[in-house]
Amino acid sequence: MCSNDSPSEKHDGTVDVSELLELYDQHVETVEQLPLPGYRIESLVTETTAVRETLAADGVVSATTLQVLLCGIAEAIGDVEHARTVPAGAARGADQLPEGVHRKPYEMTPDEQAACLDALSQLQFAVVETPVAVDD
């Protein structure tokens, strides 16, 4: 990635950790608003927060921790790509769902699907930019 594409990369090629921390905060807020099932949101928020907290404390994150988050993102992307798309405003089978549940998981409009894929891709880019701890 070149410096023009990466908000956390400085011109000398190093990563600005404080900007990455802000990005991770923004990603948590974004993920919480995505039209994904609660378990998927909870998992992504937990994994993203773990990366952010480790980065804040150590300035680097273990490859394993980053891999866990990347796997969660990849699973979410796969689910979103295979979601049943419905037209905006269409009934989403709410009559068949338990009380308090507003719609079936992974049933979304094309706009929601595109927004999810964009948000998850942006989170992937943040992970790729995150400094990795060197194994001893």
Image (cartoon, rainbow, N blue to C red):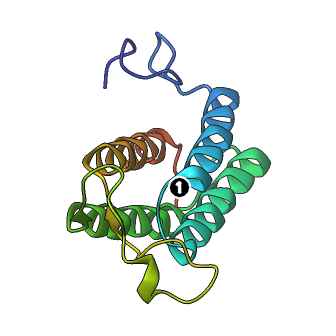
Name which residue lies at 53% across and 43% down: 131
Q: Looking at the rendering, which quadrant does residue 81 occupy?
A: bottom left
Name which residue lies at 61% across and 55% down: 32
* Camera-nearest residue between 10 and 41: 41
Q: Position of residue 122 (x, y in %)?
A: 41, 40
Q: Looking at the rendering, which quadrant does residue 44 occupy?
A: bottom right
Q: Could you tell me which secondary element the residue under label 1 belongs to?
A: loop
In this rendering, would 63 be left or right of 74? right
* Camera-nearest residue between 119 and 11: 119
Q: Position of residue 99 (x, y in %)?
A: 61, 86
- Image quadrant for the N terminus? top left
Q: With respect to residue 67, does 26 lie above or below?
A: above
* Camera-nearest residue between 104 and 3: 104
* Camera-nearest residue between 57 and 21: 21
Q: Which residue is labeled 1 in the image?
A: 134
**In the image, farthest residue toward the right:** 57
In this rendering, would 94 be left or right of 65? left
Name which residue lies at 20% across and 68% down: 82
In this rendering, would 125 be left or right of 50? left
Q: Amino acid at mark 1?
A: Val
In this rendering, would 89 be left or right of 132? left
- Image quadrant for the C terminus? bottom right
Q: Looking at the rendering, which quadrant does residue 111 occupy?
A: top left
